[in-house]
Amino acid sequence: MTLKNLGKFYGITLLIGLVVTVIVSLVFGYDKLTVYLVRGEYGEFLAALIWFMGYGLLIASISQLAFFAYLFIHQMGQGIFKGGWNSIQVVIILFAVIDLVYFRYLRFGQKDGDILKFIWIPILIVVFGIIVSLYKNKLTGKNVFIPAMFFMVVMTTVELIPFLKVKDMMWLYCTIFALLLCNAFQLLSLPKYNKASYEERKARKIARGTWVEEPVQTKVKNTKVVSKKKKRK
């Protein structure tokens, strides 16, 4: 990917994280943000708004780092485990979902014994991940459902771990919705920016007169010549 397209890719991810975090904070963070607007305390509202905007940019940056880490992990997994990489990803996805419930339950819900209210997080991640992965499959026309689910479930869970220790649900809402949308955007739009980068490099080489068309690879089928000998009576 060229620097120009990488900048666009990162910039839109930042914008998504910022906008989603501000919208969620206005809805769920009434006492931390919206209340100042209702009271007419515009200075305090602006200061709080800038704080949440910075938080959204932080979440988007974490999402971007996790995405490039996923690309490295996926290539390494394919190189090491070959055809077994998909099966390994499925196992890791299951462990991630179980740990997401269990970790938060041990931290906050063990005292009251109510585990049901901690199940909504993995349910949201899994359902959203399935929708995004199916759409990714449709866009590419290839069977990439399991790798897409791995990124949407496992990497989102890893990104969420530092924020699961926070008791204030408002911060968790701001984090999880921003992460999911930033991750979905990156997963779905990466081929578009790769293609744009390819066309940009091609245009530069054509302008310099150094462009060489890549040879089209053709599959040659092996043919066997079988000679039949007639038996003489």
Image: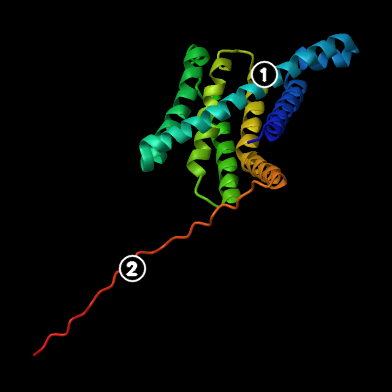
Vertical placement of 211 versus 229: above or below?
above
Residue at disc 2, secondary structure: loop
> Which badge, 1 or 2, comes first in the chain's sequence?
1
Task: Give the residue furthest to the left.
Answer: 233
The quadrant in which the N terminus is found is top right
10 Å neighbourhood of mark 1: few (<14), some, or many (≥20)?
some
3D distance between C-alphas at marks 1 and 2: 59 Å
Q: Residues within 10 Å of mark 2 (few under 14, many from 20)?
A: few
Residue that numbered label 2 is attached to: 223
Viewer can see residue 120: no
- Does the image show residue 184? yes
Q: Position of residue 10 (x, y in %)?
A: 68, 29
According to the picture, the residue beneath numbered tag 1 turns out to be 58
Front residue (pair 62, 4): 4
Residue at left offset 66%, top offset 42%? 201
- Disc 2 marks a residue whose amino acid type is Thr
| Point 56% across, 52% down: residue | 214
Q: Residue at x 52, y 23 (%)?
A: 158
Check the image and report above or below for 214 versus 12: below
Where does the image place residue 44, in percent across and percent down from the top left?
Answer: 84, 9
Q: Position of residue 150 (x, y in %)?
A: 49, 35
Task: Tell which tag, 1 or 2, sits nearer the viewer.
Answer: 2
Instruction: Check the image and name the residue furthest to the front.
Output: 209
Residue 111 lies, in percent from the top left, at 49, 11
64 left or right of 17 in image: left
Horizontal side of 120 relative to 207 (left or right) equals left
Q: Determine whether 182 is above or below 87 in the image.
A: above
- Which quadrant of the structure image shows residue 37? top right
> Is residue 97 or residue 229 the one in the foreground?
229
Would you say 224 lies left or right of 67 here?
left
